[in-house]
Every structure is written in structure tokens, then in C-alpha cells.
Amino acid sequence: MIITDSIGAPRNIGTKTYFTETWPYLINKYFIEKINYSHFIFTQQALDSDLLIENLKIKLDLYDKEYIFIQCGIVDCARRVLSKRIQTILSLIPGINHIVKFIAKKFHYQLTHLYNVNYVSEKRYMKNLSTFCQNFPNSKIFLIPILPAGEQMRNKSYNISYQIHIYNQLLAKLEQELPNVNYLKDVYDSLLNNEDIFLSDGYHINGSGHLKIYNSILRFIQNDFEGIFHQI
């Protein structure tokens, strides 16, 4: 099972990223060719760890899950101008909501400098991911880091690189606490100082970025599963 936010999905922001270029597609293709194992691929726009738990309760537990890849966290960690609760309240007042959204978008960097609002706190993010992983004690779980932010995103969201670092540290901590969890830090490292992989929003990635992620994952699983793959 491969679970990702919109980072792992096809994307059309100026440059098109096709499904066949995405790392979930490439990893699934590799598993099919090597051990005749196919993953269920689940992607959801604006997926955070709260929604991950909701999906777990509703349906994710119903799929084959010998191997689980999870990419989720940028929605959790990025600073926001407004909390989810305030956004819900404002949505009931269309005129004011429109004005607030305009101001929040225009002055996003300045306002996120003033307010440190996250959709999901560090504590809850850790709890959510731990809960999810502990629900699958017999699965091999691979945590994909929150990707580094491109220049466009760094200019838009205050302190985003630090936020990403802090939440990624929580993923690394999960690897230490749970024996079936692997944190693939090399994925993050492989994308550092590579501005050419980002689409115009500075966070979603093109086919080249997906290929880098795929190759980093592949290096890990080939070492980890060497016995399995070499038996084929």
C-alpha cells in the first residue's frame, strides 16, 4: 500500500507530471516485476495526519498491506495564517471570508512570521503517525520524509525549512521506537539544492524529482530486501 498527499500524485502546474512519472507508480512497477506484488496506491490532496487516521478508520485497513509507504506531513507542518477551525467559521460568512483569504494570500509570509499556526501540532503529528504504524505491526513500513522546500515556497511561508526539519525528526524518532518502521532520510538528502525539480509552487515536483525519490527508495529496499529480490 502506498499512501501519499498530492506530492506523490500527477500534477499540472505549468509543467505536467504524469502518473507514469510519479514515484508511487515506479515503485509499484518495480515490485510487480520483481516479486509479482502490486500495491494499492492512495493519494489525497491536502492529506494531513489527521485525515490519514480518518482514512485508516474508514478504509485503509481493508487493503493488502505487507509493505506500506507513507508520504504525509507538509500540510501538517507548514505555518498557516488561520487554523482549520477559524477557516470553517469564516466559510459561513462569505463576504468576510473572501476579504480574509485575499489578505492571507497577499501577506502570507509576513503573517506566518507573526503567527505560528499549524494544522497539526508536532505532538499530534507524532501521535497520529505512531497510531497508524502500530495498527500494522506485521507490515514493513517506509516513511518518506517531508521534502525540502523550493525557493518559491521558502519565500512564501516563513521558516518552512525549519518546520520541515522538526517534523522529519519525529519520523526519524518513530523509526527508533517501532521495529517495523524505516525512515528513508536519503530521499530528503537527494533533493537538497535541486531547484530544477520543483514546479512553480516550489513544492510539488516534476518527473525528475519523482525519479530521484524512486532511486533513493530503490537503493534502500534493494539492500533491505536483497534476499527476497535475488531469489527471483
Image (tube, grey):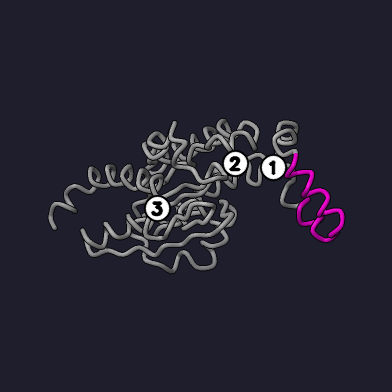
Q: Secondary structure at mark 1?
A: loop
Q: Which residue is mark 3?
A: 69
Please, what is the three-letter code of the amino acid marked with disc 1? Arg
Q: Is residue 20 above or below residue 197?
A: below
Q: Nearer the viewer, residue 38 or 152?
A: 152
Residue 102 on the magenta span: yes
Give the foreground label among 3 and 1: 1
Q: CA distance from mark 2 to mark 1?
A: 9 Å
Segment tinted magenta in the rendering: 86-106
Q: Is residue 224 above or below residue 116?
A: below
Q: Earlier in the sequence, mark 3 or mark 1?
A: 3
Crowding near pointer 3: few (<14 within 10 Å), some, many (20+)? Answer: many
In-image side of 202 versus 216 (left or right)? right
* Label 2–label 1 contact, CB within 8 A: no
Q: CA distance from mark 2 to mark 3?
A: 19 Å
Q: Position of residue 8 (x, y in %)?
A: 45, 53
- The quarter holding residue 97 reads bottom right
Q: Earlier in the sequence, mark 2 or mark 3?
A: 3
Crowding near pointer 1: few (<14 within 10 Å), some, many (20+)? Answer: many
Q: Is residue 223 above or below residue 53?
A: above
Q: Which residue is mark 1?
A: 80
Q: Which residue is mark 2?
A: 77
In-image side of 88 versus 159 (left or right)? right
Identify the residue at image location x=83%, y=61%. Answer: 92
